Image (cartoon, coloured by chain):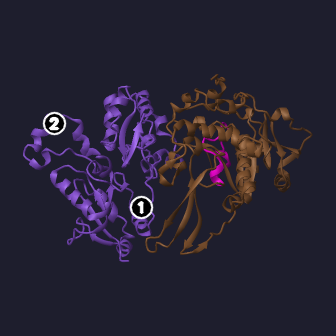
Chain colours: A purple, B brown
């Protein structure tokens, strides 16, 4: 059997996630040995766009061109991976969805037809995603583990427990106790709690956990004196479109809401 | 058991002697109290019990179990280190006892045993409950130490609890003086630490009061990470990029509070419900372990309450639980 054909692509995004792939600089030559890195337009000139075993896609769908590229990649690949916060949740660019169109339309969008009728959305709003590597930026070692797992035929499960698990194991005390608006308890870890290790609260860049107690998180933030606008803004910064129940939770009307989390249907109570 | 007298001004001298022969681990005060390798004996802080548990020195957070290359397995050298632990409370000592039961009696865990083998346990008796969360008095803890230091205002009394302790007392005999005093059972009790009421909790499995806990539970796993007895772990493989047949199997702490803990093939999760997970911890600590080992796993240190982001006090919940009909 020949090497697996892998592509790394970016649609609307900052290219930081693609940089995270390359930042495995000590192993990049081994990666090229391990898989046939056919396409990586960010760093390669020749990129045949056919027959992939796996494509890793950074960024979110923000215009018609993105959608076309994404659908083409999905058609041409056996497996498709969401890389980074934008691809997984919609992240900061999805903020456009939470504000009225008339607030921003006149600025740019009137001139750019291809953006006008596409809502900024994560990849799984349009196509089936097989695996998620979240984070802003994603953990470079996690990308490496994925590629190795792909070749070995045992892809590691995405880390789905909250940031707090690694945070406590690192010997940190809780930032919520210090009154900081840390989103660790509802955010998927796997990041080794790098921000909290440095004394900086978690902003939730790896997206909400399937098991989050969002209602309690909101109560805790309110108890610490944060107003609803702040809570809304902070929670949505990285969770993007993956907190459809937030409004109901904030208004105290939370009840069973269905959402999709990393491709799995989840009921949030 | 045999008791010696240590003059207060000789404590630092004793610690310095220990430092000549051992790596000394003691409670130090930083942002919170942690058990850390000691440099200066003056840094020891005995005013309150440590926030983080002692277990990480024996049951490590992350550990390489073995290396593999194809089908060849290489178990790493497991050197033991001569270490003296000073300032362990009665709860810490019993937590070590319970983990010893799991990793050295039930099974032989070479990694735990190697770390535990050359360790000397020197306790420090609490004259009063050091934290409002303590409830060790409700749990009938045993004597489990090499030496135990009792603060008796003018002097320290040092009780010898094992042959290792006896060896230490002999070695540093010049520091101790003989005494006719004894430590009575009454003196071993810690006032203000028996707030968990005795009741048969098996009657309460389906009680509606568990909601009081789960409504405030984030399932963050702080309780199990800070618990000195919780011993659950998970394992995973890490392979080299240059050769994917070569790598390491590692284990790290896990927690029954996480859905991931009981997730099995086919995405089935045995304890999906937060309440199930919350109750499982309490029942394992107070009931299930007791069925097998005759003692509850819990040692009543209260760290799971002190370290909980929402301070869920399961002792309070249990005390207020009443048998429900129907």
The answer to whether mark 2 and mark 1 are in CB contact below 8 A is no
Residue B168, percent across and down?
Answer: 82, 54
Q: Is residue B239 above or below residue B141?
A: below
Magenta segment includes B281: no
Please name the residue that numbered disc 1 is placed on: A141
Q: Of residues B230 and B323, which is closer to you in this image?
A: B323
Residue B29, percent across and down?
Answer: 60, 42
Q: Secondary structure at mark 1?
A: helix
Left or right: where A71 falls relative to A113: right
Which circle, 2 or 1, is nearer the viewer?
2
| Pointer 2 or 1: first along the chain | 2
- Chain designation of label 1: A
Q: Secondary structure at mark 2?
A: helix
Residue A106, percent across and down?
Answer: 9, 39
Magenta segment includes B39: yes
Residue B247, percent across and down?
Answer: 52, 69
- Chain designation of label 2: A
Q: Can residue A174 be seen at all in this image of the molecule?
A: yes
Q: Quadrant of the C terminus of chain B?
A: top right
Query: In this picture, which residue range is highlighted in magenta?
Result: B37-57
Please name the residue that numbered disc 2 is placed on: A101
Question: What is the spatial separation of the Cα atoms under label 2 and label 1, in whole angstroms?
Answer: 39 Å
Left or right: where A88 falls relative to A141: left
């Amino acid at each position: 059997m020949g090497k697996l054909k892998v592509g790394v692509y970016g649609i609307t995004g900052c290219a930081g996630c693609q940089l995270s792939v390359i930042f495995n600089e000590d192993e990049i030559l081994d990666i090229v040995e391990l898989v046939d890195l056919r396409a990586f337009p960010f760093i390669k000139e020749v990129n045949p766009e056919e027959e992939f075993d796996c494509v890793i896609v950074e960024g979110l769908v923000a215009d018609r061109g993105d959608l076309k590229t994404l659908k083409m990649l999905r058609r041409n690949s056996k497996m498709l991976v969401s890389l980074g916060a934008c691809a997984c949740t919609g992240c900061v660019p999805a903020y456009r969805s939470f504000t009225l169109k008339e607030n921003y339309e006149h600025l740019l969008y009137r001139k750019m037809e291809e953006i006008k009728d596409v809502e900024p959305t994560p990849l799984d709003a349009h196509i089936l995603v097989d695996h998620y590597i979240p984070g802003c930026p994603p953990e470079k070692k996690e990308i490496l583990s994925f590629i190795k797992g792909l070749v070995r035929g045992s892809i590691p499960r995405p880390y789905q427990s909250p940031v707090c698990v690694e945070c406590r194991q690192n010997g940190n005390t809780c930032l919520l106790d210090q009154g900081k608006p840390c989103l660790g308890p509802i955010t998927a870890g796997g990041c080794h709690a790098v921000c909290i290790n440095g004394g900086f609260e978690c902003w939730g860049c790896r997206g909400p956990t399937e098991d989050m107690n969002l209602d309690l998180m909101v109560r805790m933030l309110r108890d610490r004196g944060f107003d609803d606008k702040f809570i809304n803004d902070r929670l949505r910064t990285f969770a993007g479109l993956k907190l459809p129940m937030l409004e109901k939770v904030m208004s105290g009307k939370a009840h069973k809401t269905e959402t999709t989390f990393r491709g799995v249907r989840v009921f949030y109570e | 058991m045999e008791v010696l007298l240590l003059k207060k001004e000789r404590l630092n001298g004793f610690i310095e002697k220990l430092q000549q022969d051992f790596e000394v681990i003691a409670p130090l005060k930083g942002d919170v109290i942690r058990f850390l390798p000691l440099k200066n004996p003056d840094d020891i802080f005995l005013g309150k019990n440590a926030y983080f548990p002692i277990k990480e020195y024996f049951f490590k957070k992350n550990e390489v179990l073995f290396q593999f290359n194809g089908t060849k397995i290489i178990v790493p050298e497991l050197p033991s280190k001569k270490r003296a632990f000073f300032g362990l409370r009665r709860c810490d000592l019993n937590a070590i006892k319970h983990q010893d039961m799991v990793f050295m009696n039930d099974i032989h865990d070479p990694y735990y045993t190697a770390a535990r083998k050359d360790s000397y346990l020197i306790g420090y008796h609490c004259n009063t409950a050091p934290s409002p969360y303590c409830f060790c008095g409700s749990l009938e803890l045993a004597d489990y130490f090499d030496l135990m230091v009792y603060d008796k205002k003018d002097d320290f009394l040092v009780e010898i609890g094992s042959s290792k302790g006896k060896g230490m007392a002999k070695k540093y005999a010049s520091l101790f003086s003989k005494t006719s005093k004894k430590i009575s059972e009454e003196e071993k009790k810690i006032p203000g630490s028996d707030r968990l009421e005795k009741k048969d909790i098996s009657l309460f499995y389906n009680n509606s009061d568990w909601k009081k806990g789960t409504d405030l539970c984030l399932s963050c796993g702080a309780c199990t990470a800070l618990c000195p007895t919780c011993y659950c772990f998970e394992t995973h493989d890490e392979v080299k990029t240059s050769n994917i047949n070569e790598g390491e199997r590692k284990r790290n702490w896990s927690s029954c509070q996480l859905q991931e803990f009981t997730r099995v093939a086919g995405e089935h999760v045995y304890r999906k419900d937060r309440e199930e997970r919350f109750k499982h911890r309490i029942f394992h600590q107070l009931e299930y372990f007791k069925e097998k080992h005759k003692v509850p796993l819990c040692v009543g240190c209260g760290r799971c309450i002190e370290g909980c982001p929402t301070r869920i006090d399961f002792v309070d919940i249990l005390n207020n639980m009443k048998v429900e009909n129907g």
